[in-house]
Amino acid sequence: MAVTAAKPLPKKRSDDKSPSRWVYLFSELDLVEQVTGTKWDNVKALLGGKGANLAEMTRVGLPVPPGFSVTTQACNSYLENGNTWPEGLWEQVIHALSQLEEKAGKKLGNAENPLLVSVRSGAKFSMPGMMDTVLNLGMNDAVAEGMVKLTNNPRFVYDAYRRLVQMFGSVVMGIPDEPFEDYLTEVKAKKGVPSDVDLNADDWKHVTAKFQEIYKEHVGSEFPQDPIKQLEHAIEAVFGSWNGKRAIDYRNAANIPHNLGTAVNVQMMVFGNMGNDSGTGVAFTRNPATGEAKLFGDFLMNAQGEDVVAGIRTPRPISEMEKENKAVFAQFNDIVSKLEHHYREMQDVEFTIERGKLFMLQTRDGKRTARAAVRIAVEMAEAGVITKQEAVLRVTPDHVSQLLHPQFDIDSKTQAVKAGRRIATGVNASPGAAVGVAAFDADLAEKWGKAKKSVIMVRPETKPDDVHGMLASKGILTSRGGATSHAAVVARQFGVPCVCGAEALDINVRDRVMTVGEVEVHEGDTLSIDGSTGEVFVGEINRVEPDFAREKYLQKLLGWADDFRRLGIYANADYPVDARRAREYGAEGVGLCRTEHMFFQEDRLPIVQAMILSEPNSAEEATELEKLLHFQYDDFYGIFKAMEGQPVIIRLLDPPLHEFMPDHEQLLRQVVGLRLMGNRPNELARTENLLAAVEGLREFNPMLGLRGVRLGITRPAITAMQVRALFEAACQLKLEGVDVHPEVMIAVTNHANEVKVVRELIIQVADEVMSRMKVKVEYKVGTMIELPRAAITAHQMAEHSEFFSFGTNDLTQTTFGISRDDAEGKFLLNYVEQGILPENPFQVIDEEGVGYLIQLAVERGRKQRPELEVGICGEHGGEPKSIDFCHRANLNYVSCSPFRVPVARLAAAHAALKDKGQASKEDL
Amino acid sequence: MAVTAAKPLPKKRSDDKSPSRWVYLFSELDLVEQVTGTKWDNVKALLGGKGANLAEMTRVGLPVPPGFSVTTQACNSYLENGNTWPEGLWEQVIHALSQLEEKAGKKLGNAENPLLVSVRSGAKFSMPGMMDTVLNLGMNDAVAEGMVKLTNNPRFVYDAYRRLVQMFGSVVMGIPDEPFEDYLTEVKAKKGVPSDVDLNADDWKHVTAKFQEIYKEHVGSEFPQDPIKQLEHAIEAVFGSWNGKRAIDYRNAANIPHNLGTAVNVQMMVFGNMGNDSGTGVAFTRNPATGEAKLFGDFLMNAQGEDVVAGIRTPRPISEMEKENKAVFAQFNDIVSKLEHHYREMQDVEFTIERGKLFMLQTRDGKRTARAAVRIAVEMAEAGVITKQEAVLRVTPDHVSQLLHPQFDIDSKTQAVKAGRRIATGVNASPGAAVGVAAFDADLAEKWGKAKKSVIMVRPETKPDDVHGMLASKGILTSRGGATSHAAVVARQFGVPCVCGAEALDINVRDRVMTVGEVEVHEGDTLSIDGSTGEVFVGEINRVEPDFAREKYLQKLLGWADDFRRLGIYANADYPVDARRAREYGAEGVGLCRTEHMFFQEDRLPIVQAMILSEPNSAEEATELEKLLHFQYDDFYGIFKAMEGQPVIIRLLDPPLHEFMPDHEQLLRQVVGLRLMGNRPNELARTENLLAAVEGLREFNPMLGLRGVRLGITRPAITAMQVRALFEAACQLKLEGVDVHPEVMIAVTNHANEVKVVRELIIQVADEVMSRMKVKVEYKVGTMIELPRAAITAHQMAEHSEFFSFGTNDLTQTTFGISRDDAEGKFLLNYVEQGILPENPFQVIDEEGVGYLIQLAVERGRKQRPELEVGICGEHGGEPKSIDFCHRANLNYVSCSPFRVPVARLAAAHAALKDKGQASKEDL
């Protein structure tokens, strides 16, 4: 039931010029620009990416084998007219070919002086699934014989010929590769040799003949000896491949329009395997792993491009090229330096030396690691090659994220995979690599954690009262739940690597064993998990640790990013240690301090439970709240101090009370057991009472139950206690000379009256504390906007709120009517796979639905209160696409987990720069 | 923390005329109209309701005791200027008094010919909490003696005098009633008599003297002997009572503006207790119980108004008045007939005969039962007194609702209350009166129900798998849950009377006993519950049964209503019997047929469970679905047939699958028990497997989980089965010549792609069935709009939907982020009480939030597809205020439970008529 609507074709633009020119030589770029204008994007649209680059290199004066491009418009015209060559195209191809022959000094099909060419497709965007390459076109029986005479190298010639027959057969005529490959295997078996290199000239000649037979069998006619026929068919095949099924599927998936068409590039062949004065290689203008500004690459003499990557012969480092041919090496250095300056980006080039002459075959922006991306961008900007804006845009948020999490050493991981130690792959829920011993419950994880053991906490799924164990662990592994399950959310919040929903794992908590196939992992066994990829390994894998303080290039880049962004970057931090880390990472405030996380701590939970079980507004409740007050005071004191001079938004109690209570099912089991045993009446009575209390708090849909402000209004003493602790801490710090900016936030509101009522209580308690402590602290009161009704009535909410903070987790849940905990494993990820939802809305803000409500709320809220401060504190606050939306929605800030702060700083800068019309790397 | 914001005072209108006239005689209505215009509402605003009516009666020439009104503007001016009499007011009062004296032929304070007057407040709207009445004003020691001489009836005179002292003391001077009452009790005790009537003239004279002492003690000065002073104080007291706390609270609660002010009516006293030629009575121009057009009332000769209602003497039927005074009776008949024609409404009048002369003291629209309201409206319209529109507007939806539910006989109920048999009062969740024996579980209720016993099913709360028992019961009683708990919703749907959340009841299901205080109700004991009032009784109370077919007046009225309304009225019906009833009640289609209710039936549930436990898309699943297909075919066949010629909207499966499974907790208890016993391994294994399956289906927030379309996409075979059954039934009927209009509805959608995918499946199955059965059936495919995202993206949903149906229950839950099941008992009703929410949004549509989304969806949906059919099928579809909203929101129809159809027909007519500027009864 997949949704795969083809994108509609846009109407033909009326200003489309119907070009009489369908073909351009690589050397005619200036001519091309007369038609397209000089905008690179338009040049690429006409010549395709590859053709444009070859033309550009040619214009710069680099030694590029001559050739020509048949334009994308020719392709479109051909396809639109029922696979008919447009008028003039063939004539232009023939004319271009004769110009090419002239430049090459060779002629296609001329046995005495033969020209061989390659034919390649090349669309505007690089696109797998389209016709690839036909090499050595122009070869036939006569040419082969002539070339043997010319080169005195029959093995080279027939190797080249048999390649043409196979490539032409499979790529152009659609013959499967198997018959060719099968025959080759047969030949080697007959000779008793393992490898192609062991075959000699005669072997290849026979193979060529046999391949021509295979060709005839499948096609029904002879392999065309006429090179012009070869060329005609090859060009048609490239055109036709544009509408191949795989190409269409790819364009649908990658959002590429279907009306672009592909160009066809015809280029003179050059050979690096024509002797010891020939060679071939690939190189990067800088180190793609570290970013160091030093040429990096490999080459081989007397070899073809394939040989460098195939690993049959060991290539040599590029620096040694100097020894082989000093002049060529100097020329090469000069060329790549020019290329990097020309393209203003680190280049990945391919080259061939044919009989001492250097040819550049390809240049393109080089792929690189996150570390290299950052260093290259910074150094190029410092060298004045690119602007700081460009540098910022060239680093992706993913790059930053990768740099800030420990990663497995590639070699160590590769070995583990080979050794079969990778036992499962789950959801890559929180990035980073972790190694530790398996602990099957939170208490043990905490105990071992305190004993300085590295622990991987393993659970079918986690719950709020597992958090102490999760915090004590180096990694978290679950067999159930998706990327926004409890485990995942907490893990990301605290920067703990996490793999969740690894369904292959059968986790038996009772027996303390995890099984997958034949493998058993017992408690205490060592595991390694990669939260960036979702992989789970038995045993240890070596790691590379991150250190933000030492990431000098990143820090410089983010400093520039800070200058460009408009959004503020806050962090969600519940403890002083989080707040300090957030600040170190560049946070400008705390956008969400969740007071309930403090309640879950081991030393407080019994007090919290006693408070819950007490009668509302009773003396007992007051006693327990008084105890909690002291804890909360310390919490707030610590956070305010850590965030001196910056705003700290404290959210009043949010979750339903039963989250703090013992597990209902466990109590039920105990009661049933105690009843059947019948010999412990006191324990039974006590457990029954507790069970009854827990049942009283149970809810069918706790997400939509008695929580947040509803709780704050139902049990105002809890609210009052929290507010008192908050203001006592703030006042005390003010008295100590610390600059504090508390903001009190009310959660789960859906009606302005809720805000009004609690706001009045807050003001009353604050006044009481400040007058008692004889000091004034400036503060704000605001509300979460996390329910659709709150967003819709934002103008009313704003009457009583100085700030809004969008809780996009809950807002997404209620707008979609989807419970994240229930949906992700059961249907949500399927929905994304089937294309029903474009993305998981818990990861990327759903702009159409949730985004509509956010924009409505911003608009209505600011209309009521123009100075209203608006931010977001849901998980989306650290996700780049969502940050881009927040920028466009005119929010004041985003707040995210401390570990995401650097990512958010960069993403916010990208959003601002894009807003000014600059495209970022991830858009391209 | 209650929210009781005083409503802001509107600005004084600039066109307010500052009248020099503060006082008008009852006979000066024409003069009043020169100031106010003839609009009755404006006259009432100036003179108050009572004053305006007295003036109107005077103008019509009825014998009204003369008097005058001090205007509401005088009151406002007095209050605005710090309780200062406005200029000219006192002079005008004195002048009016002299005119009154002239008309009466008596003088205030003149002992020889004394005028006594009453002073009453009278605002535009009748308003409890304001100053009531001072009678006999003008009496003093001298006047009393003079009157004794004149009447020769000292008992009458001193009884009147002591009443003035007490009334003036308490009402005007604020003395508590206790000292007066205590003394009276003391006097009677001393004399050894039980009743006031046993006191003689001397006694009353002494009481009067003692009352004057009490007055002096409390006020600090003598009771004013000057009648003019009495009048001045009385008028000031009326003015002041406008701003009394109770009056302000009442106005806040009843939404009455605070700036209206009250008038003061001063009127000559007349006495019905001046001898056997005097008398007093009350009468209705028609029978207020049945509506019959025949004078109805009571009278007593030689008596005061109080005596008629106090029950000390038995009043006589009004018809007997003819025997007492034929002329007066004829005059009276003539007057009330005039009054009814004049006011064009059944009147409730008070009259007094003083020495053979008839005086009309009051006329007002008479209160009446629902039955009477309908008959009166219809008969008055048929007589041409009012229009049909007016007739429709004069009957309230509540009237209709009352008529269609069995009700307790008033006498029987009163006796039961007196006998202490009313044991609790809960939420009046589903109207109607029910009597039956208590059954503490659904199975027993069903068993007894089948055995033709009348059953009241008693549960702490109900769940979906209790439905079979609920359907077999005459009434439902729960101790937990509010007006939209499961019990309440199901009960209303099926028209079963229900009282829920009767928290005083301790229901012990295990021991089969319900306790409240000392009362124990065992299984099988008889209970009576009143779902209209929430009362719970032990024992039987007699009932009056409704019968729509016999409600000829109601049917006529609703026929008129049908002509006026624009909204279509559909019914929610799951079974053919419902559909037939809906049609009988006037439904024009089925707006919601919930296929899951069919799944819950006893003979199907095991098949449903087997289907759920089978592997999706397995042979086993197919087998079970095939069995279900036959059941569903029969269901749909029956419903389509019952609704011949009308549309039937079938909703595909909606709830999460675990609702069909055994209870998790029960299974858990069993497993724990079986494990401990250890002697039944097979049963343990089986139960463990079932438990595991149920656990696999469990959800944290099932409301937001795998249900509706999510299920339909995850298990498409279920969808296909339902659609096949539906079209096979429809095609079969078409072949049989029955006109069918199926519409297929998809539930819980939030993205257009969900609709698209399922719509494609529906079309595919429909095509398959229709081509196999060789017949074409016209049908529609549409979607529920019950999640905020669906509403926001309605333009996209409409691309794939021919109709929308708003599921306002879920839409309210998600828009508010409130789970109805959890919230109502725990905080929602408190919210309404505290004024945080103006109303329970599950009863009345929240226009600001949910209504916003509805309007947005209608607008966006119709923009995409102008012919889009839009309705509502949530509980709100039968609620009058919500129906009014649906009319304004331009919906095509509302769909509600069959029992609410007549109510909805009327409410829809009201909405349409109001839209044209006509006010309905409930607005006044």
Image (cartoon, coloured by chain):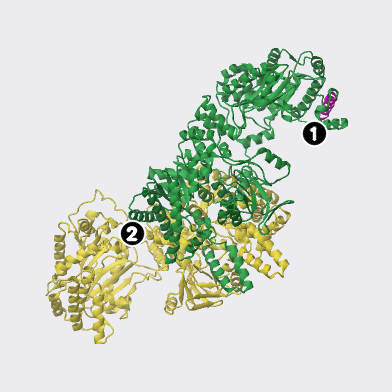
Chain colours: A yellow, B green
Q: Which residue is mark 2?
A: A252
Q: Position of residue A817 (x, y in %)?
A: 49, 54
Q: Quadrant of residue B342?
A: top right
Q: Is residue B636 above or below residue B906?
A: below
Tell me the element at label 1. Answer: helix
Q: Main secondary structure of the magenta part?
A: helix
Tell me the element at label 2. Answer: helix
Q: Nearer the viewer, residue A260 or B264?
A: B264
* In magenta segment, residue B210: yes
Mark 1 → mark 2, Cα distance in angstroms: 88 Å
Q: Is residue A866 left or right of residue A333?
A: right
* Chain ID of residue with mark 2: A
Tell if the residue under mark 1 belongs to the same chain as the one under mark 2: no
Q: Position of residue B782 (x, y in %)?
A: 41, 49
Q: Is residue A158 left or right of residue B333?
A: left
As shown in the figure, which amino acid type bears the numbered disc 1?
Glu
Q: Position of residue A489 (x, y in %)?
A: 52, 62
Q: Which residues are magenta?
A: B203-219
Q: Is residue B267 left or right of residue A597?
A: right
Q: Which residue is mark 1?
A: B178
